[in-house]
Amino acid sequence: MKTVVLEVMSAEDATADFLRAWKSGQGDGAEHIGFATPELLWKVLTAKRWELLKAMAGAGPLGVRELARRAGRDVKGVHTDAMKLAQAGVIERTSDGKLLFPYERVDVRFSLNAAA
């Protein structure tokens, strides 16, 4: 099952994780998409966009109209949300203009720490 991890991490932590995997030759088996802050993660992953990811997971490339049908939404709104997800690097656009979320599983990771 192809997994993506959507997580909040600093650029320094992302670099350290990359270097650790590079040196060991082993990753955790998942692809990672990082966000600088929890607020940015939630700005990109609104409830409606999360619904699009659920409709796209494991489905292969989809046209905007098909995605709108699957999500039960209007085409214009789906197009707008899909472009925001693509700009953030969460979904891909294929060479023929379709939308692709090439994962079957999504893990979302972030922490809330008490103020110092």
Image: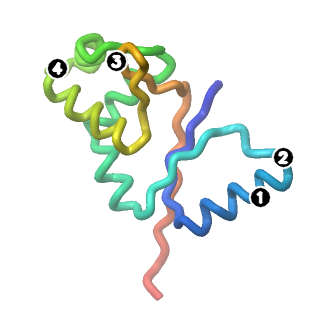
**Image vertical order of residue 98 relative to residue 87, above or below:** above
Q: Earlier in the sequence, mark 1 or mark 3?
A: 1
Q: Tell which tag, 2 or 3, sits nearer the viewer.
A: 3
Dot 3 falls on a residue whose secondary structure is: loop
Q: CA distance from mark 1 to mark 3?
A: 36 Å
Rendering colour mode: rainbow
Q: Name the residue tied to disc 2.
A: 25
Q: CA distance from mark 1 to mark 4?
A: 43 Å
Residue at image location 47% in from the left, 88% down from the top: 116
Q: Amino acid at mark 2?
A: Gly
Q: Tell which tag, 2 or 4, sits nearer the viewer.
A: 2
Check if mark 1's residue and mark 3's residue have beta carbons within 8 Å: no
Q: Name the residue tied to disc 1.
A: 20
Dot 2 falls on a residue whose secondary structure is: loop
Q: CA distance from mark 4 to mark 3?
A: 15 Å
Residue at image location 68% in from the left, 64% down from the top: 16
Q: Earlier in the sequence, mark 2 or mark 4?
A: 2
Q: Name the residue tied to disc 3.
A: 97
- Locate residue 50, reporting x and y percent: 34, 36
Q: Badge 3: few (under 14), some or many (20 or more) residues near its Cα, within 10 Å? A: few
Q: Name the residue tied to disc 4.
A: 75
Q: Earlier in the sequence, mark 2 or mark 3?
A: 2
Q: CA distance from mark 2 to mark 4?
A: 43 Å
Dot 1 falls on a residue whose secondary structure is: helix
Total marks shown come to 4
Q: Amino acid at mark 3?
A: Gly
Q: Earlier in the sequence, mark 2 or mark 1?
A: 1
Check if mark 2's residue and mark 4's residue have beta carbons within 8 Å: no
- Locate residue 27, reporting x and y percent: 75, 45
